[in-house]
Image (cartoon, rainbow, N blue to C red):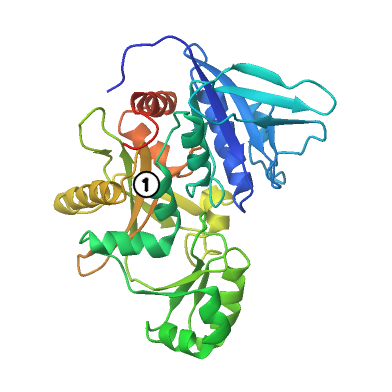
Amino acid sequence: MMNEPSPRVRVAVVFGGRSDEHAISCATAAGVLAAIDRERFDVVPIGITRAGQWVIAADDPQQWAITEGVVPEVGAQATAGVSIPLGDEPRDLVVSSAGEVPVALNAVDVVLPLLHGPFGEDGTVQGLFELAGLPYVGSGVFASAAGMDKHYMKVVLAAAGLPVGPYEVITPRQWRVARSDALERVAGLGWPVFVKPTRAGSSIGITRVDGPEGLEAAIAEAQRHDPKVIVEAAIDGRELECAVLEGRGDAPPRTTQPGEIVVTGTSHGFYDYQAKYFDADGVTLAWPADVPAAVGEQVRELAAATFEALGCEGLGRVDFFYTPAGELIVNEINTMPGFTPFSMYPMMWQRSGVEYPDLITELIELALERPTGLR
């Protein structure tokens, strides 16, 4: 699956960012910095602070790892920042320090943006790289934006004939001028429901609501992370995941056999933020999932179709519900899934025979193969 070794490539590894998933992005960077093939790639770590400042970051995986009692964060630098010149040439990153002449770093060949959530996974940073003429790993502007926005993701997938669950969207204006109508629409979904920020990941800001009495508080919690809220009907089903990797050339997307998330810890009502990142013993990945072979193949077909319906590139993880009636429902696609060695996406590829460092190499090579701009 992998190509023969190529000359050394200079890779800017970008992480941190302005979203609530800043620490998760740092943890992803820790895994990649520790595993990337240093004989093939020169690495330039670039951190983005919570305030949005771009800085040259330490090339130290331990500094960016999530450990017990320590949540990593990119710190601001008072005197230096990194900028990316726009236009096709040159591709030099520029380091600016107060009172000093800006210094150009060596040219960067490709960017590996390990950003999760708004201001990174949602098409914003992808647009910057397009303007700079820089190849980058992962989906482009539209696919990143649509994949991040659970509302428009469902609109696109439903239009493509893919199965999605019932939901309602509450915009900021609707909440201000027609709150009772919004609450009535949500009640029409039945109970329980899951109230979510529309443009967030890592299960941040999600609340399970079992009746009308808890609904407004759950909406307020979601609005702390995103003014637009989506409310989804609860679906009785097992949670399956499928990892997707873009095909080389004109080949179709590649998929793994589906895995199943099993929450074994008694403190989690669902696969929430704490279960994902702070309770490794309370969650297991059953791989391959114990489902009939025909269902496993259908998951893979639907995952590839979801990837292509949004025009995704590079990588994606598609999450499903598998109901007792045998239905498969697409829950969401994640265009930059968690990418630590212990995250579900690389784990599924590792169990499929693609080791973590080789997966990083493959994604970088895919990015270098395709042009920037319209494609």
> Residue 166, position in %: x, y?
33, 74
The front one of 355 and 212 is: 212
> Residue 260, position in %: x, y?
35, 52
> Residue drawn 33% across and 71% down?
236
Q: Horizontally, is 119 left or right of 327 in the view?
A: right
Q: Horizontally, is 229 left or right of 2 in the view?
A: right
> Residue 289, position in %: x, y?
29, 50
The kind of residue on which mark 1 rests is Arg
> Residue drawn 53% across and 46% down?
116
In the picture as drawn, the residue positioned furthest to the right comes out as 99
> Residue drawn 66% across and 41% down?
67
In the picture as drawn, the residue positioned furthest to the left comes out as 294
- Asked if residue 51 is positioned above or below residue 263 in the image, the reply reads above
- Asked if residue 334 is positioned above or below residue 4 in the image, the reply reads below
> Residue 79, position in %: x, y?
82, 31
* Residue holding disc 1: 317
The front one of 341 and 169 is: 169
Q: Secondary structure at mark 1?
A: strand
The answer to whether residue 329 of the structure is visible from this angle is no
Q: Horizontally, is 157 left or right of 230 in the view?
A: left
The front one of 13 and 232 is: 13
- Asked if residue 177 is positioned above or below residue 23 in the image, the reply reads below
- Asked if residue 58 is positioned above or below residue 39 in the image, the reply reads below
The answer to whether residue 69 of the structure is visible from this angle is yes
> Residue drawn 56% across and 29% down?
13
Residue 173, quarter of the rendered image: bottom right
Residue 248, quarter of the rendered image: top left
Crowd class of label 1 (few under 14; some 14 to 19; many from 20; radius 10 Å): many
